[in-house]
Amino acid sequence: MTMFPMPMPEMPQEVIDAVGADPGAFAAAMGQGMEAFQGAMADGGDMGAAFEAMGDVMGPVFQDMGVSPEAFDAAGDAFGAAVGCGCHMGPADAGGPEMGAMMQDAATMMMPEGVDLPPPVMEAMGDMGQGFADAGCAPHDMAGEMMPPPGEPGFPMPCDANGDCIVPPGDPGACPGDVCQPPPPDGACADMGGHMMPPEGGHDHPPMPPDCSMPPPMEVAGDVAMAPPPGDMAGPPPGDMAGPPPGDMAGPPPGDMAGPPPGDMAGPPPGDMAGPPPGDGMDALGDALGGPPPGDMAGPPPGDAADAAIGAAMDGAADQGGAAGAGAGDGAADDGHDHAQTDEAVDPSADPSAGMG
């Protein structure tokens, strides 16, 4: 069984385009590189020198296919980290078919979602695994050559404070579950018969120890190599992403946003907005109209007003010796005042009740 990094390193777009444009040529370039690797190993070279020979052959061929040297190096680093991680956590006695399956699954997982590797390239990946086995390469030794040293940028597994990998070789269950993932359930490792896959129900992954961390991403000139660990994928923590904390984002606190508190916004508080209390206001209105306040404007209640008016008229008539209203004009003319004002000269506006009825 084995596991792969999470997130997976991504394949540079230039390499993806070259695979899609001519899968056969891409597969042939891989085969030529594998021959160079085996030749270097047969000549007594070490694995590091053999990988260099492999790159010296494949680089120019890929460049003719439109892959820049920077993208080629980035693809090599990303593929080495992904496959190296699988070989590190895979069984120590994995043979050519197992290593080929790990390479096929790693390459598939590095492609964008919905993009499949063409059959010629998948076959070349399987042949490469068998070629490594034929050259006498053990998977755990290959992992050490394909990945950066533990703790350095691009190393795909967690390390402790001393920079040492916390996952022992051949023990995929020791990898914290949030930084590793199993092979795809329908991939090449699954086709090996199940012994390359996690146990039923998955591994009982331990949590990340407090003194461990993921090494930083690879520093390469190409577009993409090794993606950052999940905790760093989105940049700074949410509290810093939008600047100051929410309480400062809109300026002063809500109570100060619109100036003075609501009671002062429109002048005096609601109780004072319309001036004095209703009783005083209506008294002022009555004084302005030249009469008693509204409560007294109509005098006594309707029934008392009629009685008072009739009684006053009868009393006046009795005092003058006539019927009510009789000689009223004469009495007015003889009251000793100069009545020079005529009906036409009377200003109706002087009457407080003029125009109100």
Image: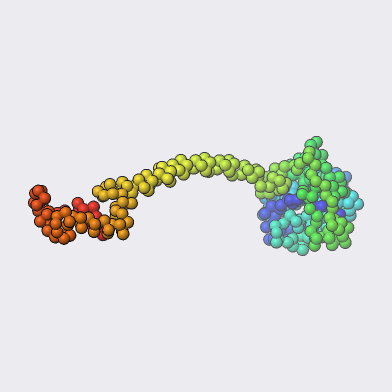
Question: Where residue 18 sits in the image (x, y, percent)?
Answer: 69, 57
Residue 213 can be seen in this image? yes
Q: In this view, does 277 lie above or below 104?
A: above
Instruction: Give left or right: position of 262 versus 62.
Output: left
Tell me the residue at 31%/49% (across/down): 293
Quadrant location, the N terminus: bottom right
Instruction: Give left or right: position of 357 versus 336.
Output: right
Furthest residue to the bottom? 119
Furthest residue to the right? 93
Tell me the residue at 89%/50% (across/down): 92
Residue 36 can be seen in this image? no
The front one of 269 and 260 is 269
Quadrant location, the C terminus: bottom left
Instruction: Give left or right: position of 305 versus 77.
Output: left
Question: Where residue 345 sits in the image (x, y, percent)?
Answer: 12, 54
Question: Where residue 162 sits in the image (x, y, percent)?
Answer: 80, 36
Question: Where residue 211 sits in the image (x, y, percent)?
Answer: 78, 38
Instruction: Give left or right: position of 253 versus 210.
Output: left
Tell me the residue at 71%/52% (across/down): 10
Tell me the residue at 80%/55% (across/down): 182
Q: In this view, does 123 lie above or below 163?
A: below
Q: In this view, does 178 lie above or below 248?
A: below
The front one of 205 and 18 is 205
